[in-house]
Amino acid sequence: DKYKEGLSKTRQSFSSKLNDLVARYRTVDEDFFEDLEEVLISADVGVNTVMALVEELEMEAKRQNIKDAYELKGLISEKLAEIYAGDDFEVTAPLNLQEDGLSVILFVGVNGVGKTTSIGKLAYQLAQEGKKVLLVAGDTFRAGAIQQLSVWGERVGVDVIKQSEGSDPAAVMFDGIQAAKSRGADVLLCDTAGRLQNKVNLMNELSKVKRVIEREIPGAPHDVLLVLDATTGQNALIQAKTFQQATDVTGIILTKLDGTAKGGIVLAIRKELNIPVKYVGLGEKMTDLEPFDPQAFVYGIFS
Ligand code: GDP
């Protein structure tokens, strides 16, 4: 399936390390658990999750009197999935789509993380579900951003509301909303500029764009999705914190999970930021975007 395919790098790196560990120890002792911690941390699972997991495994090994490392290995994926789902989050976090009327989704994130691609993929999925989708080319700053979104629009058969490069993003957003209203669109997917070099500008621009949306449609935006690149590892966490200060992020799209051997970052992000991961990108194709499912993820990196 999609998860298994997209996570093959993480799985290969992770399972070879795990198999080495099991072969090296045969019987479990304290050193085994310490080395296991290292293996998990090297997959970017996140220190807190790793600690909780290993503690749980040690207790379970005692409880069931498991001495054989191979036998314990079988418990790891089970416990990881349990720990992961056992927190405050719902197992999956769907989009906050309105049953009636227009839903507005704002996409934020730095350049190169896969924002445009994710908008295109999501537009494709929503259109497939029979929704009338419109895109707003709100990144008027980066050269080529408008054109790139237009290409995705054509590819998935969805119109793009745009102005020329350098124009006011808030004005483009206003246009987008008017177009969505007059055409009776169900979902408006809005791109934004992703420059982080100037944090103050970014914040000002985002809040201006958001104000336009809030004023035109009470209750909107219904989702603010932060796009993060899994291959940037711990850097993604730092970016997330910056964006959290700039705006109310309601969900994360974690892209390029297929491009990293450290896919455990998705667990760290969700645990440590307290923001649900709503989608994961598992490839470059239109169909390579999946709702994040922790259970499928955990089994994807183990089996
Ligand atoms: P933006 O600057 O944030 O809009 O980034 P783009 O959407 O242009 O994406 C940057 C690059 O990442 C492109 O080459 C995309 O094809 C690639 N990309 C985006 N999402 C994924 C993904 O989930 N997996 C892989 N392998 N590549 C991706």
Image (tube, grey):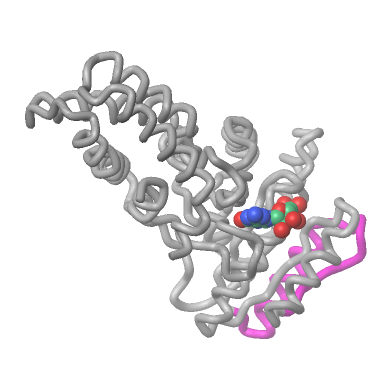
Which one is nearer the viewer's eye here, 247 or 153? 153
Question: Quarter of the image containing the N terminus?
Answer: bottom left
Q: In the figure, residue 209 lies in which quadrant? A: bottom right
Name the spot of residue 278 as percent of width and height, x first: 48, 55
Q: Nearer the viewer, residue 120 or 89?
A: 120
Q: Is residue 119 visible?
A: yes
Give x and y (percent) for residue 298.
36, 47
Segment tinted magenta in the rendering: 159-185
In reply to whether residue 175 is colored magenta, the answer given is yes
The residue at 51%/57% (across/down) is 279
Left or right: where 47 falls relative to 279: left
Indicate the position of residue 274 as horizontal and vertical percent values. 43, 38
Q: Is residue 176 above or below residue 208?
A: below
Residue 192 in view in this figure: no
Magenta-colored stretch includes residue 183: yes
Residue beneath the point at 39% across and 30% down: 20
